[in-house]
Amino acid sequence: MAPSMEKSHAREVREMFGRISPRYDLMNFLITGGQDVVWRNFLVRAAGVGKGSVVLDIGAGTGVVAKAAAKKAKLVVAADFTPEMVAAGAKKRPQALWAAADAMALPFSDASFDAVLSAYLLRNVSDPAAAAAEMVRVARPGGRVACLETTPPPPGPLAPFIRFHLDRVIPLLGQVVAGDREAYEYLPRTTQAFLKPQALARLFTEAGLANVRFRTFAFSTQVVAWGVKPG
């Protein structure tokens, strides 16, 4: 993607998430039936967050993952490039230190964090490989990098029902609850265009992680992938 297109994409995504920030947590609960909390908690475990850990949650949104990580970690930095999300997160989840940051060019030194994690970030950036490389860069040797993402529904008897939920139910909820149908048409569109679990694991391997693994949830429409930075 050309630099001008990257900037345009980033601006559109930032504006969209800014618009939906007041109803972001409620919409996530409704879309997933409350299961997103389960997946985010698994993400924290997969990232190896424990006592003494210094953690970065990039693309933190309103900080649901950061809050879960803060229960175990020594320090959690929650970063997002949408000002409205940072403001909402800092108010709702003061357990974390909040920062404005672009996942494509993180303002942190190499090897700064014991665990680096993200939820629903890579699907929204113009270059997922570059964002994954940045996550690996700021992780300490021996630390873990992990992400939670939506993934295209696999073929099978449930596929029509999953696509109906993505294409019809989610946009309708977005229109009624968040007042923004367009934003919640974007979600299923980018989900169906995103990487499959195996490809996401490969992305992390190519970014420099070792022992990359993944686990799927919700009929393989959600995936947590994680690995260890060598050294």
Image: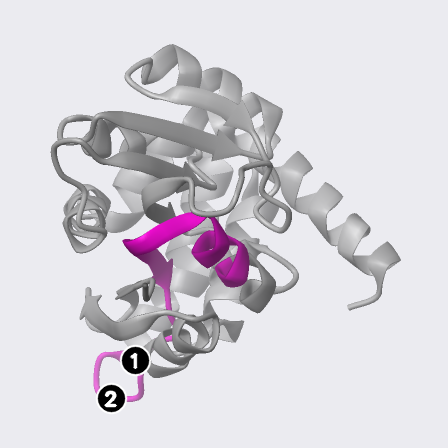
Residue at 23% from the left image edge and 46% from the top image edge: 40
Q: Residue at x 51, y 16 (%)?
A: 87
Tag 2: amino acid: Gly
Quadrant showing the C terminus: bottom left
Marks 1 & 2, CB-CB < 8 Å contact: yes
The amino acid type, in three-letter code, at marker 1 is: Ala
Percent coordinates x, y for residue 92 in the rendering: 34, 15
- Relative depth, front residue between 146 and 92: 146
> Where residue 172 appears, x then y in whole percent?
45, 47
Residue range of the region highlighted in magenta in the rendering: 132-159
Q: Is residue 103 above or below residue 210?
A: above
Residue visible at 56% across and 38% down in the picture: 180
Mark 1 lies on residue:
159
- What's the CA distance linking mark 1 and mark 2? 5 Å
Q: From what the image shows, is residue 124 above or below residue 77?
A: below
Count the numbered circles shown.
Answer: 2
User: Which circle marks residue 156 in the picture?
Assistant: 2
Q: Nearer the viewer, residue 109 or 19?
A: 109
Quadrant for the N terminus in the image: bottom right
Does the magenta run of residues contain 145?
yes
Tell which residue pokes out farthest to the right in this image: 4
